[in-house]
Amino acid sequence: DAGITQSPRYKITETGRQVTLMCHQTWSHSYMFWYRQDLGHGLRLIYYSAAADITDKGEVSDGYVVSRSKTENFPLTLESATRSQTSVYFCASSGRDSSYEQYFGPGTRLTVT
Amino acid sequence: GENVEQHPSTLSVQEGDSAVIKCTYSDSASNYFPWYKQELGKRPQLIIDIRSNVGEKKDQRIAVTLNKTAKHFSLHITETQPEDSAVYFCAASRKVVGNTPLVFGKGTRLSVIA
């Protein structure tokens, strides 16, 4: 678990501001994911990446941007934060091996005022 | 795309009793079905998974069953303990061929009453 980290752990921002959430993993996992967790909705996929420079939209990608220039990093940017983006954000990673297990980061609690 | 339904949304059991959580999925090509446990304020963690070439898998007090024909799978926890109290998520995806991300159910909050 210590191999995947997120920063910041807590963030308060104002409506309209740009904010970037960072995710870093030390396992050289090919796949990385961003989810948001809201009460009553479970874990919803925002974006995922199969490798460096390859990203794909998930279920709730509007208003978010990602990049993956290096295998170990997968930052998530909210271009113009809205109150509806108040949530807990989890980053996750998994390898290409047969275990398929997805490892989650500790999460970032984001509040948009 | 895949859709995963999970029931019940909340479940209370007495310590020592069994708990069962059920999930259904829509994509007949899904072949990987993990279960995650999330304690309050913590990250989700994998507790058990099953692949479509297997009907049942056990790990101590936890078991998962899969019915491919009916497209449903279940988590069974026996001899429940207070530390089993958490939110449990099921998920489904295609792996190996047509690798797709996990699609999660909305979760079940399990409370084990001592």
Image: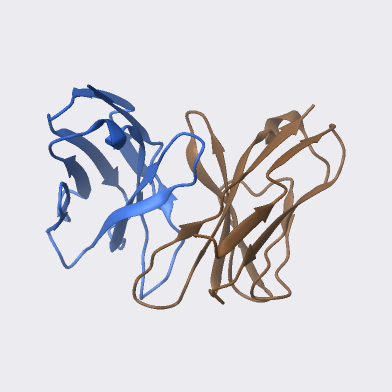
Closer to us: A45 or B43: B43
Q: Does residue A76 appear left or right of residue B48 in this picture?
A: right
**Relative to A26, is B11 on the left or the right?**
left
Classify residue A30 by image quadrant: bottom right
Does residue B70 appear to the left or right of B29 in the view shown? Answer: left
Residue A32's image quarter? bottom right
x, y percent for residue B103? 42, 51
Q: Give the residue displayed 68% in from the left and 44% down from the top.
A: A9
As rendered, which of B87 and B93 lies closer to the eye?
Answer: B87
Q: Quadrant of the C terminus of chain A?
A: top right
Residue at the spot 12% in from the left edge and 59% down from the top edge: B55
Residue A48, position as x, y percentages in the image = 58, 61
- Chain represented in brown: A
Q: Which chain is blue?
A: B
Question: How many numbered marks are there?
Answer: 0
| A13 or A27: nearer the viewer | A27
Q: Residue at x 21, y 64 (%)?
A: B52
For image coordinates 38% across by 68% down, the residue present is A100
Residue B54 horizontal side relative to residue B49, left or right = left
